[in-house]
Amino acid sequence: MLIKNKSYYKITFEDKSVAFFNTISGSNISGFTFNEEDAKENASSCYGTGFFIGKNGLIATNFHVACGGLRQLLSEINFKAAVIQEMRDQHEGIKSDIKYYAQRLKRNHPDDSLYFSNFLPANIDENSSTGNEEDEGGDEEEEDIENTSVAHFHNVIDSKIELKRKIETVVSKRFKIEIIPVELGITLDGSTDDTNEYFCHLYSLTDNKNVDLAIIQTDSKSEPGNIGKGIDVFSTNTGVGNIVDKKDTIKVTTPLFLVGYNCGPEIAQTSKGIKVQLTKGEVSQDNDDYRVLYSIPSLAGSSGSPVFNGNGQLVAINYCGYADENNFNYGVLACHLQKLLNKKPKLTLPD
């Protein structure tokens, strides 16, 4: 099924303070704020693919599909280090802003001595001056300050001092990060004649950054009545099971088949509803402990797609392409999905 997700990240500190951000790439996050409404308004959106896995409306997909705002491989991101660095960078920027507006205040209202003596000294570096020296810092340019009243300067500086204090309060505290979905839902393939959108919630996230997997669940905790049987990854059948076991090497040139939604609704949308695509290729390299490389062409939106062998066994879950080539793609080995299901559900981000 086609997954649509819009979400943001929530940071909860050990003192129960909270902050939020919208996207992350490498060591950089964007949209850091203490205001949840701002985070919600700027939540990141994405499309991906998922598939039912046996019972209770559980759906397998990628971690980066479930979070919506991931802009880089999960294995390359240190979430906590990025948050700490962003808070430190913002703290330095705010100090520059306070100095900047203090300079403007003194220039426009040199007689405002009480405010200077009571509020500013603790929030400006000891070696900083608020005189008429060359202006430094500030995120806003001079021409943006149309209101030069005392009250306006006080409000701006006070709000920045408050933000600076908030960061100082939490920057050294331990914290956890969660994903907060704003809109998370699935749409079924048009062959079902079901055009409903089924709303979902997060069920479990990987705790291993080498395994880009997540499980979501329909809010009803059941599958729609008009779909076929899902892939039972709980199966313990002997002989040819439903998934390829980790101990089995997936040999080079083994034919593989991917079922997914390349480019999301852009390609999938037809006059008869959304239609899934079937693409095929073969194994290009012996698998390691976590992934297998194959020559199946895919585009954004196919993340989370199941990849099968000729026996109909689940081999992998598609999760990324190699560089800019759309016909060299990686899938997380299916045995890791089974491991994720056997663990206690976890909704915090991996360290």
Image: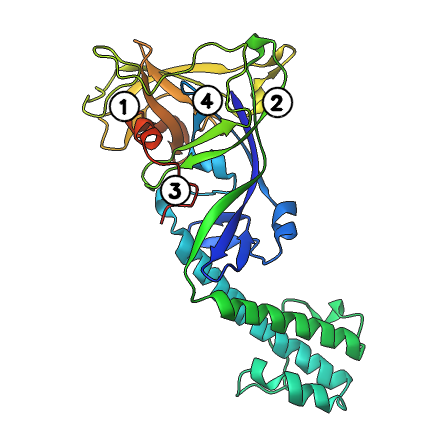
Disc 4 residue type?
A: Asn
Q: CA distance from mark 3 to mark 2?
A: 28 Å
Disc 1 residue type?
A: Ser
Instruction: Determine which residue is flagged by label 1.
Output: 284
Residue found at x 47% / y 42%: 70
Q: Nearer the viewer, mark 2 or mark 4?
A: 4
Q: Secondary structure at mark 1?
A: strand
Mark 1 or mark 2, earlier in chain: 2
Mark 2 or mark 4, earlier in chain: 4
Q: Position of residue 248 (x, y in %)?
A: 19, 21
Instruction: Determine which residue is flagged by label 3.
Output: 74
Q: CA distance from mark 3 to mark 4?
A: 27 Å
Disc 2 residue type?
A: Glu
Mark 3 or mark 4, earlier in chain: 4
Whether tag 3 and tag 2 are in contact, CB under 8 A, the answer is: no
For residue 56, which numbered disc appears in the image? 4
Q: Nearer the viewer, residue 83 or 173?
A: 173
Residue 161, picture quadrant: bottom right
Q: CA distance from mark 1 to mark 2?
A: 37 Å
